[in-house]
Image: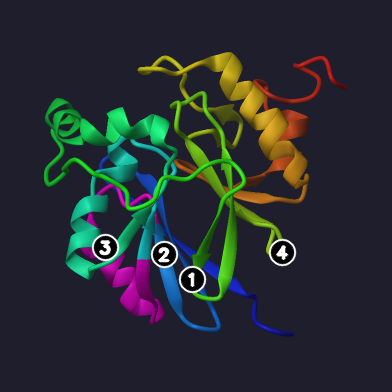
Amino acid sequence: MSEPAIKAAIVPVTPFQQNCSLVWCTKTMKGAVIDPGGDLARIRDASAKQGVTIQKVLLTHGHLDHAGGAAALARELGIEIEGPHENDAFLLNGLAEQAKRYGFEGSEACVPNRWLNDGDTVTVGDVTLGVRHCPGHTPGHIVFFHEGMKIAFVGDVLFAGSVGRSDLPRGNHAELVQSITERLWPLGDDMRFVPGHGQMSTFGWERKTNPYVCDLALGRA
């Protein structure tokens, strides 16, 4: 059996136990860190253990537990930051203030080298990840996915049995549901996903059972 083109390891970070993901191309062993909210030593240890060279930071959105360590990690490793969508600029600019509010240390404002839009792609080694703009939790939230390996990294858009909060600045519940049903479900029921918190699931299982976005609850059964 041939080795998969891409592998991932989940590295829980920050007091919020956010699912930071180390994703790498198995051919080149070059990788990306998705949502380094903090605990950078833990992230570097995970990359060393897997033998992965981190070449970029990818951000799903601008909340503290996802982006708080991005600027420092990029500076330490001399790498660039890609994502999220530019509509989250106000959150990235306010990371230091967010940190004071929640008692986090070492978080700082972040300016990505590249903003991402729906339909864009990013590269990790020789592997290409697709991008979906999925506003609702935040206005600039994006999701990364690999169609061939059937894996998505959805940040705080969707969880096992739940969906992201929409009561935070510029959140919108109706927009969140629309993002999930129109931009995630078409990727296929067999698409596994890593949420920002908690356990993995599949789009198909959530489409059947998630009380917020299942077909029955939305009158689509």
The image shows residue 33, relative to residue 132, as above or below, that is below
Name the image quarter holding the N terminus. bottom right
Q: CA distance from mark 3 to mark 4?
A: 29 Å
42 magenta-colored: yes
Query: Could you tell me which secondary element the residue under label 3 belongs to?
Result: helix
Query: Could you tell me which secondary element the residue under label 4 belongs to?
Result: loop
Q: Residue at x 73, y 37 (%)?
A: 185
The magenta-colored residue range is: 34-55
Query: Could you tell me which secondary element the residue under label 2 belongs to?
Result: strand
Type of the residue with mark 2: Ala
Disc 1 + disc 4, Cβ < 8 Å:
no
Q: Earlier in the sequence, mark 1 or mark 2?
A: 1
Whether residue 154 appears in this view of the structure is no
The image shows residue 209, relative to residue 28, as above or below, that is above
Q: Quadrant of residue 213?
A: top right
Q: CA distance from mark 1 to mark 4?
A: 14 Å
Residue 157 image offset from top left, x and y in percent: 53, 33
Whether residue 217 appears in this view of the structure is yes
Type of the residue with mark 4: Gly
108 magenta-colored: no
Label disc, if present, on residue 32 of the rendered structure: 2
Determine which residue is flagged by label 1: 24
Label disc, if present, on residue 148 of the rendered structure: 4
Query: Could you tell me which secondary element the residue under label 1 belongs to?
Result: strand
Type of the residue with mark 3: Arg
Determine which residue is flagged by label 3: 42
